[in-house]
Amino acid sequence: MLGVCNGFEQRMDRLERDNRYLKRVLLGCLLSAGAMVAMGQAPRPAIPDVLRARAFEIVDQSGRRAIKLSTDNGNGVIGTYGKKGDLLLFIGGTSESGGVLEVAKNAHPLVRLKSTENGEGAVITFDKRGEGLVEVGADKNGGEGAIFAFTRAGGVRAAWPAQ
């Protein structure tokens, strides 16, 4: 009879051990589920409608400025920069005339599209030193189209129609 009791006690011990193990697993599952529910209830960060700053810079992998959005005398400007940090493209406004788009190389302008003081459009091309070569736009009176060619000193070499 003692053998039957021993076998019964061993089976009860194993059953109690399995029961304790299952209780621990169930408790772990309940705690994990509770944690997931609690994390799901955390407020999501709000995405702002407007992001405001004085300037934004986008940099490359080495930290060099590639694009800059900022203001200049109250006018919005966008600049893109080369590997050497030189300005390649400028889009913005000026106090004198209005909008300007300028393509540059080695810190010298090559092409500039702009609006004049009278509100007409103009295109100016430059040499590699940044000296004006040709301007296509309006005449001084703002009434007719005109083409101007410049000397190295900056004076008007030729104009069509003649000024």
Image (spheres, rainbow, N blue to C red):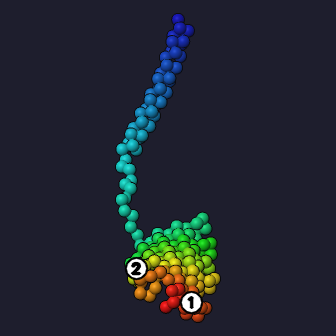
Specify the amino acid type for callout 1: Ala
Q: Nearer the viewer, residue 19 or 155?
A: 155
- Asked if residue 81 can be seen in this view, the reply is yes
Q: Are marks 1 and 2 in contact (CB under 8 Å)?
A: no
Kindly identify which numbered label has been placed on residue 158: 1
- Identified at 58% across, 66% down, the residue is 60
Q: Secondary structure at mark 1?
A: strand
**Residue 21 position within the rendered picture, expressed as x and y whole percent measured from the top left:** 49, 27
Tally the marks: 2
**Residue 61 position within the rendered picture, expressed as x and y whole percent measured from the top left:** 60, 65
Q: Secondary structure at mark 2?
A: loop
Kindly identify which numbered label has been placed on residue 69: none
Which residue ends up furthest to the top in the rendered image?
1
Q: Quadrant of residue 26?
A: top left
List the residue tagged with mark 2: 119
Q: Is residue 8 left or right of residue 95?
A: right
Between the residue at mark 1 and the residue at mark 2, the CA separation in whole angstroms equals 23 Å
- Identified at 52% across, 78% down, the residue is 123
Q: Nearer the viewer, residue 61 or 86?
A: 86
- Identified at 58% across, 71% down, the residue is 64
Residue 23 higher or lower than 147, as above or below: above
